[in-house]
Image: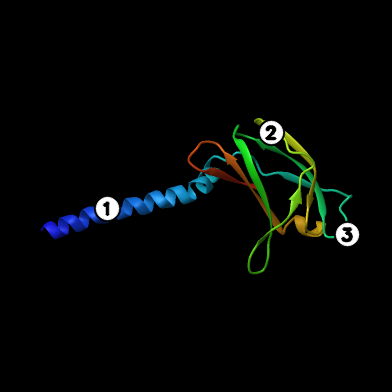
Amino acid sequence: MTFLHDLERSGKWILGVLVAFFVLHNGGIVEGMIAPVVTIAKITISENSTHDGWAEVSGEFDKIRDCRFESLEWYWKGEKSDSRIAMTFSKTQTRGAGHQVFDKWRLQMPADQVKGNSYVLVYHSCHPIWKTVTRFYP
């Protein structure tokens, strides 16, 4: 009886560790789906986009929650896997909650691939537990 009791207790402990690991590993993604920091951006591709493989975009979005910006990752969808692309901002700025406008973001991908063949994830610190991940585009 002691063996079964110990097995049951250790099984609960292992299950608890697995649940905690899952929550800590995926909490930021789940939080971003339930309580996003930003809305989906409306993107405009600039006529200044070059033919050397770089696109210039501008757009607007709403920042719903006042969390600290950490990073933004733009991905180009591939057949087998997605690739994170290089990008530059016109300027880095701290944004409070509310309607936001941005311009002159340069993306290292052809302009005709931006809409429909890319997506953006943005990371914010809303609390000390994890980084909140929000889908920014599309």
Disc nearer the start of the sequence (2/3): 3
Type of residue at label 2? Thr
In screen coordinates, is 49 left or right of 101? right
In screen coordinates, is 110 left or right of 84? right
Estimate the x, y position of residue 13 in percent, counting from the top left: 28, 52
Of circles 2 and 1, the one toward us is: 2
Estimate the x, y position of residue 39 in percent, counting from the top left: 65, 41
Where does label 2 land, which residue?
94
Secondary structure found at label 2: loop
Quote the CA–CA distance across marks 2 and 1.
44 Å
Which label sits on residue 12?
1
Where does label 3 land, which residue?
51
Type of residue at label 3? His
Q: Quadrant of the N terminus?
A: bottom left
Type of residue at label 1? Lys
Tag 3 and tag 1, C-beta contact below 8 Å: no
Estimate the x, y position of residue 23 in percent, counting from the top left: 43, 48
